[in-house]
Amino acid sequence: QLNETSDSMDENTMSTQDGHTLPVLKKILDLSSKAQNLKKQHVALSEQVKLAFESFPGLDFLKSVQLIGDEYEILKRKYLEVSLERRRLNNEVIELKGNIRVFCRCRPLNENEIANGSAVSVVNFESNSEELQVVCSDSSKKQFKFDHVFKPEDNQEAVFAQTKPIVASVLDGHNVCIFAYGQTGTGKTFTMEGTPEHRGVNYRTLEELFRVSEERQGTIKYELLVSMLEVYNEKIKDLLAGNSSEATKKLEVKQAADGTQEVPGLVETHVYGADGVWEILKSGNRVRSVGSTSANELSSRSHCLVRVTVMGENLINGQRTKSHLWLVDLAGSERVGKTEAEGERLKESQFINKSLSSLGDVIAALASKSAHIPYRNSKLTHILQSSLGGDCKTLMFVQISPSSVDLTETLCSLNFATRVRGIESGPARKQ
Ligand code: ADP
Ligand code: MG
């Protein structure tokens, strides 16, 4: 049975018809008709096989079946090659929109905020899913624009629907980084990890990777490996090393022979299904909280990085690819008040500020196509160096709270995200 899943044109393709994409679209159409032709030929061959079975007895019959069988195999390969090429071109069309996306997600007001009544929502949404407005304390309004804005009522499915096309490109050999940025309590962990009932981007991503790799198993053989690490005070900790001697080993970023940045010694675990990954990530999280009095406390002050390594082997042309997908739950972006910041807490907050602003600098430099990208300014950007820039894809979720109590931090986060995106936000439009 030939694979028919890629016969309909991608929605993204249709929505990007402009001068740049037309030649690519033409090629895709051409490939579509080629695929259709091949399919017709395949149907005709199947008919012949049927006829052969019915009409030729003995040796002649076997010979003709053999010949038809060979031709069938060749056709099948050709068809799959054409399908893959079309998929690659589809991705190219998506890429023309740029490799850096910023999504904003606003959590709902929580029970406490509703109960105590003092908190009102200061975030207004537009119907276009790209803009939002923040009502400032002097009643002025500030407008922000992103690649997508998720409202408090948008669920995990809605978020993943927008994330899926970016994730899928890791199977075509692209490195991908997805970050959740924002003040503690705005839903970074909810978006990335989620809860058992409302699973987040991490789980859905792996599920999607397994689904597509199964769909392609006749053409490409994929192997998936998962690593998990934490960056706290500019130190790297392996979260999958367990209690072994590996766990206490100091990890550093090193340049590999091929010029890419690696973390030698990092544990990589083979994974065969999304549920296995869920268990592995849970065990990693348990390690993460060891040594802190409150799990939530430490998790808000360290960066948690999940790395999925995808190894692909093209069974038609023997080509091998290796790519990384990084799923990053960043440390809380809130500024620590001068009075509470002393000793250890002050050091932590300085490290967090430095790494988050370095990350902002790197993405902003990439978005503006700057010649120098300052990867070396923090452990976080150094680890991710080979997966940020070039033809790598970057997605940042800026998480915000709707509450008036969090207004200052919300504006900080939205300004950060706007700078990262390289597109200035203007004053609010007159209604
Ligand atoms: P962070 O990781 O940024 O500190 P959390 O992900 O822990 O924030 O979210 C704080 C709380 O708000 C959690 O109880 C979480 O379940 C809840 N929450 C966050 N975002 C949403 C959302 N979009 N819908 C429902 N609950 C949410
Ligand atoms: Mg969190």
Image (tube, helix red, strand yellow):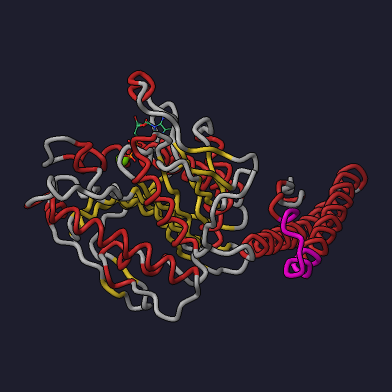
The residue at the point 29 percent across, 47 percent down is 332
Farthest-out residue, front:
138
Whether residue 87 sits left or right of residue 207 in the image: it is right
Q: Can residue 59 be seen in this view?
A: no
Q: Is 259 in the magenta?
A: no
Q: Where is residue 179 in the image (x, y as percent from the top left)?
A: 40, 52
Looking at the rendering, the stretch of residues picked out in magenta corresponds to 13-26
The quarter of the picture where residue 83 lies is bottom right
Q: Is 18 in the magenta?
A: yes
Q: Where is residue 326 in the image (x, y as percent from the top left)?
A: 40, 55
- Ligand 2: quadrant of the figure: top left
The residue at the point 35 percent across, 64 percent down is 384
Q: Position of residue 365 (x, y in %)?
A: 43, 71
The residue at the point 48 percent across, 40 percent down is 204
Q: Is residue 346 above or below residue 299?
A: below
Q: In which quarter of the image is the C terminus?
A: top right
**In the foreground, 74 or 405:** 405
**In the foreground, 3 or 239:** 239
Whether residue 49 sits left or right of residue 135 in the image: it is right
**In the foreground, 58 or 108:** 108
Q: Is residue 410 visible?
A: yes
Farthest-out residue, left:
343
**In the foreground, 40 or 431:** 431
The residue at the point 47 percent across, 59 percent down is 394
The quarter of the picture where residue 128 lies is top right
